[in-house]
Image (cartoon, helix red, strand yellow):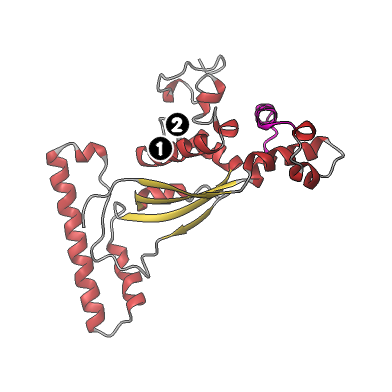
Amino acid sequence: MGQKNLKVKFISMTNDAVNLIYSSCRQCYSNKFAADVFCKKDEKNIGGDKKKEDFIKKIIKSGHESPLEHVSFSFAVEGISRACSHQLVRHRLASYSQQSQRYVRATDFDYVVPFSIKNDPELLKIFEKSIHTCQEDYKRLIELFEAKGIIKEQANQDARFLLPMAVETKIVITMNCRELLHFFKVRCCNRTQWELRNLANRMLKITKEKVPCVFERAGAKCESLGYCPEGEKFNCGKYPLGPKLK
């Protein structure tokens, strides 16, 4: 049992992503068969990588993002709290496989501490006292359940009601590129809860390295707009307000 830090690892992505997005885009504007465009390696027919990347950037800028749905990324994440994962899974155009508290016993769980508490000894003392109390009570419940002959899964699923939102969890995330762009627009914003924002920024860094032509301008909404769309009350100061929001 102890404090856990965020870890995000790239697992996989769709093969030949740029060529697949390019071929899908071309299908929308050409009478050629997309499979032929995708399979051809002759650059004079489909253009080099630079030409394909420039075309994809142009399509994204125009708002025609549906071809991006053909390419997806998968990430392995650990060191986030249940509080964070509950926000994360609200993004429904994605796939998640999360560590189960029914099948994985939490008698020695790790936990996530908010920065505002971690850096204040007085607050941290109260926080960790509560965490340890929850863990001891959880263990005691498990022991009593087992003494009464209650099977492991039943004991786990009922004892978990005592577990705090700070409990660390592990999860696999898969999103397509279009959903990732939306996810970054919403969750890289400075108004996002700090833990989910940190996760989004780690994922953004990976996607920018893997497919820069899609994600080079990705990030909070203000990054692509050049102004803050949140209104005066919620503006963080990074970008000025839009003309209609002042």
Q: Amino acid at mark 2?
A: Cys
Q: Position of residue 85 (x, y in %)?
A: 41, 51
Q: Position of residue 36 (x, y in %)?
A: 80, 45
Nearer the N terminus, badge 1 or badge 2?
Answer: 2
In the picture shown, does residue 126 fall above or below 239? below
User: Which residue is drawn at the image coordinates 42% and 20% (left, top)?
Assistant: 238
**CA gap, disc 1 to disc 2?**
7 Å
The residue wearing badge 2 is: 189
Q: CB under 8 Å between callouts 1 and 2?
A: yes
Q: Which mark is residue 197?
A: 1
Residue in view at x 56 percent, y 36 percent: 211
Tell which of 216 and 90 is nearer to you.
Answer: 216
- Disc 2 crowd rating (10 Å Cα; few below 14, some 14-19, many 20+) is many
Residue 63 falls inside the magenta stretch: yes
Is 198 on the left-hand or right-hand side of 59? left
Q: Is residue 118 left or right of residue 173?
A: left
Write the residue at 60% across / 31% down. 213
Callout 2 secondary element: loop
- Residue sitting nearer the eye, 92 or 19: 19
Q: Which residues are magenta?
A: 47-65
